[in-house]
Amino acid sequence: MIIAVMAIMMAVAVEIVSFQATREREAELIFRGQQYVEGIRIYKQKYGRNPMRMKELWEANPRVLRQKWKDPITDSEEWGLVFMGQEGRELKVPGGRGGRRRPTPTRTPVFEREREGGEGGEKVGPIIGVHSLSTDQSIKIYEGRTQYDEWKFVLKDVEQQPPRPPRDDRLPWEDVVTPTPRVRRTGTPTN
């Protein structure tokens, strides 16, 4: 009887420890993903553009990343890359009629969305973020996503947001309120 109770207690303890270890790996994934985003931000600030390859981030001098972070979920140095223009972000169309086009988001496997074209099929393009390559379900819900490869750690800056309408110097209520005419000393209004 005592052995059965101890076996049950051990099974529960293993489950709790496993759950806690997964939660810690998820927290570490968020931290490391944000480290890559910060590295991309610093790189862009320093060089005036986004890195085209991850190698540029790792070899930048002075360094923009403290280290080459591993994905804690897959325990690999390989990360999925998010390129400018993915995830429904607006793109300027070269040679277009001055307009902007919003790409249609597709639900294709991540490796098909990443651009090929570097040496030996290396993925290249203006990188704006990273994500895990694991397709496992997460415990934590991160930005409404429950699968690790859907957790996008992306540089969010003005160029990535929809364009804002041009701003004029008028205050919002100045369109509605008409100016009060000035009154001369004689008592007749002037414009």
Image (tube, rainbow, N blue to C red):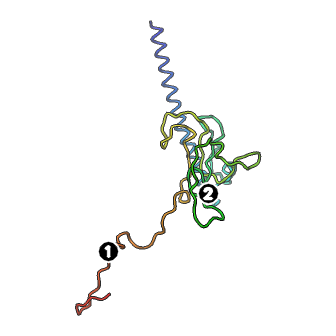
User: Which residue is found at the position 64% from the left and 54% from the top?
Assistant: 126
From the viewer's side, name the closer residue of 79 and 190. Answer: 190
Residue at which label 2 appears: 44
Image coordinates of residue 175 in percent, x first then y, are 36, 73
Q: Amino acid at mark 1?
A: Val
Name of the residue lying farthest toward the bottom = 186
Image coordinates of residue 69 in percent, x first then y, are 62, 42
From the viewer's side, name the closer residue of 174 and 13. Answer: 174
Name of the residue lying farthest toward the right = 120
* Mark closer to the observer (2, 1): 1
Q: Amino acid at mark 2?
A: Lys
User: Which residue is found at the position 49% from the left and 13% from the top?
Assistant: 7
Badge 2 marks a residue whose secondary structure is helix
Left or right of 55 in this view: 84:
left
User: Which residue is found at the position 26% from the left and 90% from the top?
Assistant: 184
Quadrant housing the C terminus: bottom left
Mark nearer the N terminus (2 vs 1): 2
Residue 25's image quarter?
Answer: top right
Q: Using the numbered discs, state the Cα–Cα distance from disc 2 to disc 1 in whole angstroms.
A: 44 Å
